[in-house]
Amino acid sequence: MIAAGTLIGLAMPVAFRTETDRTPIAIRTTVQAGLLLGAPQVSFTGVAWRDYHGVVLPYSADDGPRDAGDDLAKGFARTPRGALLAAVHIVVRANVRWGPKVFEPTIEEQVIGPDAEALLVAAREAYEELRGDRPDGDALGRGYVVLEGFRWQGYSPAAASVDLVSAGPGDSEVTVRAVTRVQVQWQGGDWRVVGPPGGTWAGSAAPVESTDGYVRFPGGGA
């Protein structure tokens, strides 16, 4: 099963896990603060929630993804909602859980920045560590994570930064949560995720007790 942290802790040795016994960190920001102009309201009217291997994700006919073939997700609108949906879909698909047919093209084509290559290397190593005796290339199983909420750090048509809260089963059937900062930039006609520092989400994630202070995802996400 996938523990919280979880939605985003894609390159960690234990898929989707965050160390929940440590002191919450000051989450680092790599997108230039000057690019982020505000924290816009996002409507979920018209958004459909669909299962993606156990994780329920939001889809919008207007804001994307417009192309969800081959288990991938591309084509997001240059809008606040498009940026939010891109952040969610890209980090989920960058997870080793779905196998290299999904995480490799996602990271190679939709993750940018100086740490993108390190993220890909870490994901490949984590996949090999976790697949056991499964055939090379197979998925590792379903996800057990719920998207609970988000909070903007800032948005502009060029870049955005958003904190995502996810929850999942921890030890002793206790639900654990984590907040992870995800940054996106508009490049090549689509939103792309900025690779986390050092190629690991550990420096961008922290435990969180509740969704207080965050915008809750409606019905399908939570």
Image: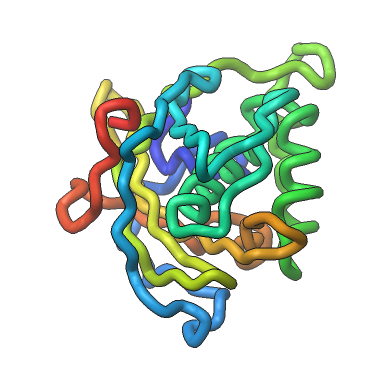
Q: Image check: 106 left or right of 44? A: right
Between 46 and 49, which is closer to the camera in this rendering? Answer: 46
Left/right of residue 205 with respect to residue 167 in the rendered view: right
Is residue 62 or residue 24 the one in the foreground? Answer: 62
Using the rendered view, name the quadrant where residue 23 is placed.
bottom left
**The residue positioned farthest toward the right in the image shown:** 136
Q: Residue at x 58, y 72 (%)?
A: 158
Number of numbered labels in the structure image? 0
Identify the image quadrant of the C terminus. top left
In which quadrant of the rendered view does residue 106 lie?
top right
Q: Answer above or below: position of 119 versus 219.
A: below
x and y, in percent, of residue 118 in the image: 76, 57
Q: On the rendered structure, is 213 left or right of 218?
A: left
In this view, the residue in front, 157 or 109, is: 157
**Point 76% across, 12% down: residue:** 133
Q: Residue at x 62, y 66 (%)?
A: 185
Percent across and percent down for residue 2 are: 47, 27
Tell me the quarter of the picture where residue 135 sits: top right
Considering every residue shown, the one lying at the far bottom of the view is 34
Tell me if I can see residue 1 in this picture: no
Whether residue 59 is visible here, answered yes or no, is yes
Instruction: Tell me which residue sits at (72%, 51%) in the image.
Output: 110
- Residue 32, given in percent of the width and then of the height, sits at 55, 82
The x, y position of residue 15, in whole percent, is 56, 35
Q: Is residue 15 above or below residue 50?
A: below
View extreme (top): residue: 134
